[in-house]
Amino acid sequence: MTRREKTVERAKKLMGRPERIRDIGIVAHIDHGKTTLTDSLLAGAGIISQELAGTQLFMDFYELEQERGITINAANVSMVHDFKGEEYLINLIDTPGHVDFGGDVTRAMRAVDGAIVVVDAVEGIMPQTETVLRQALRENVKPVLFINKVDRLINELKVDKNEMQLRLSKIIDDVNKLIKNMNKEKYERGWRVDTSEGSVAFGSALYKWAISVHSMKENGIGFKEVYDHCHSGDVKPLAEKCPLHQILLDMVIPLLPNPLEAQKDRIAAIWHGDRESVVGEAMEKCDPNGPIALMVTDIMVDPHAGEVATGRLFSGTLRRGQELRVSGVPNSSRVQQVGIFIGPERLDVEEIPAGNIVAITGIKDVIVGSTVSSIEMIPFESIKYVSEPVVTVAVEAEHTKDLPKLIEVLRQLSKEDPTLKVEIDEETGEHLISGMGELHLEIVAYRIKHDHKVPITTSPPIVVYRESIQGRAGPVEGKSPNRHNRFYILVEPLPKEVIQLIKSDAVSMRTKELERRQMLMEAGMDKEEAKNIAGIHGSNVLLDMTKGIQYLRETMELILEGFEEVMRNGPLAKEPCQGIKAKLMDVKLHEDAVHRGPAQVIPAARQAIQAGILMARPSLLEPILDVYIQVPADYMGSASREIQGRRGQILEVRSEGDMVIVRGKAPVGELFGFAGSIRSATEGRALWSTEYAGFEPLPSNLQVDIVRQIRQRKGLKLEMPKPSDYVDQ
């Protein structure tokens, strides 16, 4: 029996004992050492050899990950760890650190109960550290901290023992500040990282050693010994006396919750059904005998088995041959295989009970975020992403015969990665794919060409804009083509606080009405308006402010359809709208239903809103990225000029030793090719990263030109649109 087969046998025995299971994720900024750390944990569990750990990067098994040296896909592994004479099953997900693949981190956080947050001792808290921590806390996932690359502080920055401890303390304080600001309630309940409680470990993933307060008590190796060993370059004894996998997993088991504890707390945050229903109680108890309740967090295609759906099983026991249904899909499907992942390998097992991360095949029509169950149940809350698709490329098949295959591949990719938006432009016949950034789309294009063998050409990247308004207009009259129906609609900007509530999914049409009204009023919306929400689309709302109008109820669905059409394609440049409040003030309807059908109502509502937007000082919003550059002091000027030369702003400059950290922000449209420019401007000495920072108004002197460019690209007439194009004035 191989070591891996032994691991599977040991894992099988523990799957049914949720008190002995820990579902955890490893999260961090790019290059802070997540995958190297995972290697060390796998070597400790006997899955890979100790000699190769740290260089094998077992979880980066996709060829492009090895070629580029970055993690692109979240990868799962199950392993067994001995703690105080007892065996525990660790289901672990290694996640990407690059901002373009942040969607994988968000999805992984839905599947786990605890997270090891990895921070580089030299770089400290970086933008993506902040983002992944926010993603974890939003999903009710408890963090512990591992400060990696401590040896770099000693050998590269040449700090002394006191300075080393001060720097490490600062990182711990910074992490706690973030936790407190993001979720004060959890922070006060003890979700802070604390050296004395053992929830912080220090070490080096590459050299496979770590220390924590508990390990210091057991083996007497503390900061003094670490400093001496690193200083003399003799770190082998550290790896022998305080092996990383032992110290870290000994921290995880007592401090991170098992599924029994975690699900009591987490179900309320991720599922809004009746907690006293059969499925609600089964999930809170992590009941292996309850109905199946599975949340799909990842999909990949196996050339032999077809689609493999991976996710967290919150209740029930999965077995081959079960009939399961996917929420929102009428027909049920039969489970063909049930298994667990060990990196690239999927190993079949007979059954897997609740509390585990599982892989199943045979379920049709499943997408990432689907709820799979054995009974009718309210689906889990949809997964909310930190960023939005802000860059688009047009994709065309090189040979017409490949067109059907390309459409099939694009459909498959958007099922696997919901942060990828695919649309077919009916007018131009182009296939447009929108993603989180240049790298995200580059990887998608690579997968279409190499993994799916479809030769394609791609256009240069295009920025996705949003349309909004700065003023108020109306009520504007929209007449139906037959002139028998009239709609009076007023448009005005939505307050920023309300936009935030909608974007964070705290408020939606699924939220209970009283709860929604209360939250909107607290965010500054008028009581009468908060009471009359008729529809929400993106971050825009339609309000019904009318009173007692006959036939309106049956017509409302059509008015909403007209509203949604405009919110998807605004009147300025057919870009999506953001932050618009449309108020239906009055309606005149024909009494005969034949005269108020879809062909009459939808265009009338649509045109009134389009004209209203054009009268209310329309503006174009552009996506902005926060830019962080770490560079030697001599190159600070060159780095700053790179940001400023791209319509950017410098927000902060601070020194750390001989390095300077420049924080700025710049529009996505100006940052194409930034990687090459910053490398040449700083002779390759800059470390840099970006983080999505939302949309901001485009400078007014650029608006007309950019609107024209977009209209030209989309084949629309070049003149700026006017309200009279839509309604009689």
Image (cartoon, rainbow, N blue to C red):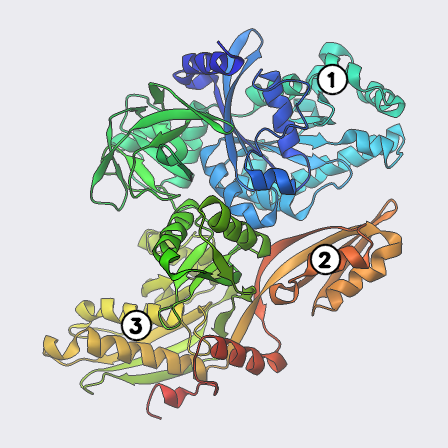
Name, please, the residue furthest toward the top: 85
Label at residue 562: 3
Q: Position of residue 681 (x, y in %)?
A: 80, 59
User: Element type at marker 2?
Assistant: helix
User: Element type at marker 1?
Assistant: helix
Q: Nearer the viewer, mark 1 or mark 2?
A: 2
Q: Which residue is mark 1?
A: 239
Looking at the image, residue 581 lies above or below residue 140? below
- Along the polypeptide, which appears first: circle 1 or circle 3? 1
Label at residue 143: none
Q: Check disc 1 and give the amino acid type.
A: Ala
Q: Nearer the viewer, mark 1 or mark 3?
A: 1
Looking at the image, residue 331 lies above or below residue 245? below
- Disc 2 from disc 3: Cα separation: 45 Å
Looking at the image, residue 295 lies above or below residue 698? above
Q: Which residue is mark 2?
A: 676
Q: Check disc 2 and give the amino acid type.
A: Gly
Q: Is residue 532 left or right of residue 457?
A: left
- Along the polypeptide, which appears first: circle 2 or circle 3? 3
Q: Position of residue 673 (x, y in %)?
A: 67, 61
Looking at the image, residue 189 lies above or below residue 214? below
Let me know if residue 355 appears in the view. no
- Image marks 2 and 3: residues in contact by CB distance under 8 Å: no
Let me know if residue 643 appears in the view. yes
Q: Is residue 558 left or right of residue 45?
A: left
